[in-house]
Image: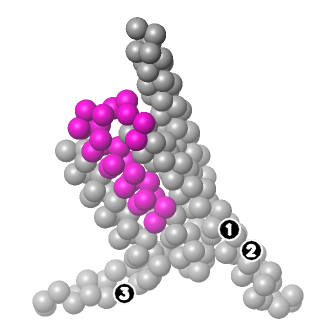
Amino acid sequence: MGLFLCWIATAVALAGGVVTIVGSFDVNVGQTRLLIRFNELYVPEYASRTGALSYFAFSYALWRLSAFLRLSRAGQVFAADTTAHLRAFGRWLLIAATAAAVLPLLAMAIHQFAFLPPGARYVPPIRMPLFNGIFVIAVATLVMTISRVIDEGRRFREELEEIV
């Protein structure tokens, strides 16, 4: 069940990234017209679209989590490959959280200082949901720590098997 939910989350994250990059669009489904609108209240639209790259990093992190779950389900909980997938999940989760916070700010800075003339520069008020990023970074760090503990347990077990 966890593996199935992980694949659904990966698909939803990829779709979220695509919708964020594409922006607003309309879809006709039979007689019904669906209006798809993406509106990020915190940063300008170009910065939101740049920050959408973090969705793809998050999707890759979820793919690594699904590989970890698949190997764990096969009974290889303490295998080196399994802990490598778990560690990679934590790393890519950290990359996604950092990209979600840094890329929109970087896009706004580049836009303000590279594309606007000196008299027209205006820095919009920036409101970032910082708690979400900090929480994800904490979870990613915890996941990487857990994978390291599992790796150490595997090494101790291998050393004990060599002694006996």
Q: Position of residue 101 (x, y in %)?
A: 61, 60
Q: Is residue 143 above or below residue 6?
A: above
> Could you tell me which residue is drawn at 67 percent across and 75 percent down?
107
First-in-chain label (1 vs 3): 3
- The residue type indicated by label 2 comes to Ala
Relative to the observer, which residue lies in front, 24 or 145? 145
Relative to the observer, which residue lies in front, 26 or 99? 99
Query: Is residue 147 shown to the viewer in this render?
Result: yes
- What kind of element bears circle 1? helix
Q: How many tags in the picture?
A: 3
- Mark 1 touching mark 2, by CB under 8 A? yes
In the picture, which quadrant includes the N terminus? top left
- The residue type indicated by label 1 comes to Leu
Q: Which mark is residue 25?
A: 3
Quadrant housing residue 27 = bottom left
Principal SS element in the magenta part? helix
Q: Is residue 64 above or below residue 82?
A: below
Q: Is residue 77 magenta?
A: yes
Is disc 3 surrounded by few (<14), some (14 to 19) or many (20+) residues within 10 Å?
few
Pointer 2: what residue? 109
> Could you tell me which residue is drawn at 23 percent across and 38 percent down?
74
- What kind of element bears circle 2? helix
Relative to the observer, which residue lies in front, 44 or 21? 21
Q: CA distance from mark 2 to mark 3?
A: 27 Å
Q: Position of residue 23 (x, y in %)?
A: 44, 82
- The residue type indicated by label 3 comes to Phe
- Mark 2 touching mark 3, by CB under 8 A? no
Is disc 1 surrounded by few (<14), some (14 to 19) or many (20+) residues within 10 Å?
many
Question: For the view shown, which residue lies furthest in the top direction?
Answer: 164
